[in-house]
Amino acid sequence: MSVASPVPTQYLSLFFRTDKPNRQVIEAALFGEAQTDEEEDSDYEAKIDDFFALVNRGESKYVIVYADDQPSEIFFASYSFD
C-alpha cells in the first residue's frame, strides 16, 4: 500500500518560493530553469533530485497547484516498491 502526504510548507517555500505555487512555477522549478530576475540564492536553488529525495519507497508526496489563488490541480511525486 502506498501513502500520500503533502509536501511540508517549509519545502514549498524552499522549492517554489511560495506556499501556493502555480503550474508554471512547479514545472520551471522541477523540470526547467528557474524563471526569475532575482539574484541567485543557494537556499532556493532546489534541484529535482532534492525534491524527489523527500519521497521514500512506497510513498507519494503531493503539492496543491494554484491558479488565481484557488486550488486547481494536484501534482504527485511517487516512488514505487518494485
Image (tube, grey):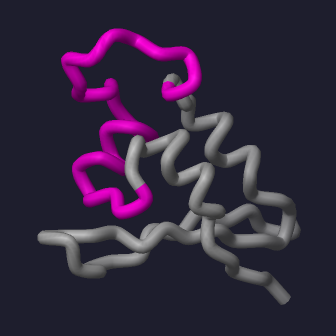
- Image label count: 0
Is 31 displayed left or right of 60 in the figure?
A: left
Above or below: residue 47 compared with residue 62: above
Above or below: residue 37 compared with residue 15: above
Quadrant placement of the C terminus: bottom right
Image location (x, y in percent) of residue 48: 56, 37
- The residue located at (74%, 52%) in the rendering is 54
Who is closer to the viewer here, 10 or 30? Answer: 10
Magenta residues, start to end = 19-44
- The residue located at (50%, 28%) in the rendering is 44
Who is closer to the viewer here, 37 or 1? Answer: 37
What residue occupies the far bottom of the structure in this picture?
A: 1
Image location (x, y in percent) of residue 31: 40, 38
Q: Is residue 7 magenta?
A: no
Image location (x, y in percent) of residue 67: 18, 70
Above or below: residue 28 compared with residue 69: above
Quadrant placement of the N terminus: bottom right
Image location (x, y in percent) of residue 69: 20, 72
**In terms of image quadrants, where is residue 5?**
bottom right
- The residue located at (13%, 70%) in the rendering is 68
Is 63 displayed left or right of 52 in the figure?
A: left
**In terms of image quadrants, where is residue 16?**
top left
- The residue located at (20%, 17%) in the rendering is 37
What residue occupies the far top of the structure in this picture?
A: 39
**In terms of image quadrants, where is residue 17?**
top left
